[in-house]
Image (cartoon, rainbow, N blue to C red):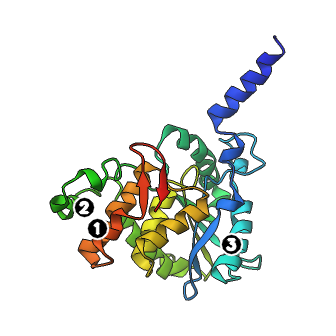
Amino acid sequence: MNSLLPLATISLLGSLLGLTSSTTLDPAKFHCVSYDEASQTGVFRSNMPISTNASNVASPSSYAYDEIKEYAARAGKDECGTDAFESGEVEPYVLEMSLSNSLDDKNGLLASRAFWSEVENFGRGRLAEWPIGVSGIVPPSVVPKSEWEDVVNKMWEVDQLPQRVDKINEIRKLGFKGIFPDAAERPLILLLHCNAGCDRTGEMIGAYRYSTTDLTAKEMYQLDVKECGRPPNYYSTHALEWFCIYEYYNSNKGELADCTSFAKCKPFGDCEPE
């Protein structure tokens, strides 16, 4: 019986530190969403960027910097048709945007914070924290349709989804040179992620795609499901419904009925594409 105690202790510590296989950077969840040739900027999505060789999630060495560059090169070529992120003389700049907001996710961010706080990594990139997760608590289906326009223009004070979508698009167009005009040109990896790379990541990427492309709400959601391997959760799916409604009233995009017909969710449970 005593021989089981060390294993249980190790398992518990690993769980507390976030060192489970599901929290390491997964190449299957690393995707190129869009690429701007003029600015050499790629928008990518992933799960938490913890190295597969991580031994201590609070250590800079546990950050998946090399994997990010490797996976960006592969996804950039396969999904966005560019070799801008292939190994070469100019190293890409990594702008990591974390959408995490829970205590569990914060464990995963320890490695990111540790890595980007080291002086020798200042020139390689930086971390920006954009916590989201409250916009989809109340779905449109429980709000009278006559109130949608008023609600949707007041609900983004915390998540700031429309503003952040605009900022992502602005950075994509500006690129590294636009952000740092006195520096030499180099490719920019704009990486958005949460913990699993499905829910808040799917929410932000889905909103970005819906706002900046001709995709329908249904097509946008189908891509989210395909790239993660499952639908975004109840909260993020309903946040996407609200964002679709926001775009209808503010950008005259799509049909209002499409905003609440691309997915079906059980109350506070799983969602499925329609």
Residue at 48% across, 81% down: 173
What amino acid type should be assigned to the residue bearing mark 1?
A: Tyr
Residue at 65% across, 63% down: 30
Could you say where residue 85 lies in the image, as x and y percent from the top left? 69, 77
User: Judging from the image, what secondary structure is the residue with disc 3 in?
Assistant: helix
Circle number at residue 75 = 3
Circles 3 and 1 in contact, beta carbons < 8 Å = no
For residue 189, what is the image quadrant?
Answer: bottom right
Circles 1 and 2 in contact, beta carbons < 8 Å = yes
Q: Answer with left or right where residue 89 lies relative to residue 133.
A: right
Residue at 30% across, 48% down: 138
The label nearer to you, 3 versus 1, is 1
Could you say where residue 195 lies in the image, as x and y percent from the top left? 57, 49
Q: CA distance from mark 1 to mark 2?
A: 6 Å
Q: Residue furthest bottom?
A: 38
The residue wearing badge 1 is: 246
Could you say which is closer to the camera, residue 216 or residue 12?
Answer: 216
What amino acid type should be assigned to the residue bearing mark 2?
A: Val
Could you say where residue 118 lies in the image, as x and y percent from the top left? 64, 53
The residue wearing badge 2 is: 152
Q: CA distance from mark 3 to mark 1?
A: 31 Å
